[in-house]
Image: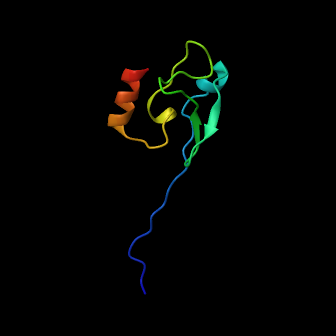
Amino acid sequence: MAVEAIFASPTVRMASPLAEQLGCALEDGPLGPLISVDDWKATSVPGVFAAGDAARANHNATLASADGVLA
């Protein structure tokens, strides 16, 4: 039987070390590290918020935009 398709799930990494430099807590997501946030997108560092793909496992432009509104 010939292989017709292969599905791969690549791992991701932070594009910038800023979250780590600020001391934000990170968590292991299904595809790589994520910034830990609460329901209002606040990180573990007071006054620092994170939204979108850096703080969400399911990457999607619409959800990232909505996260920005919450933050």
How many discs mark residues in the rendered view?
0
The residue lying furthest to the front in this view is 39
Q: Between residues 71 and 23, which one lies in front from this camera angle?
A: 71
Q: Between residues 60 and 4, which one lies in front from this camera angle?
A: 60
Please say if 33 is above or below 49.
below
Q: Where is residue 4 in the image (x, y as percent from the top left)?
A: 38, 76
Which colour scheme appears in the figure?
A: rainbow
Residue 7 lies in quadrant: bottom left
Residue at left offset 63%, top offset 33%: 26
Relative to 36, is 62 on the left or the right? left
The residue lying furthest to the left in this view is 62
Q: Position of residue 19 (x, y in %)?
A: 60, 25
Q: Position of residue 53 (x, y in %)?
A: 46, 36
Relative to 65, is 12 on the left or the right? right
The residue lying furthest to the top in this view is 47
Relative to 20, is 51 on the left or the right? left
If the image is split into quadrants, where does the N terminus sit?
A: bottom left
Please say if 45 is above or below 17.
above
Residue at left offset 32%, top offset 35%: 62
Please say if 63 is above or below 46.
below
Relative to 9, is 70 on the left or the right? left
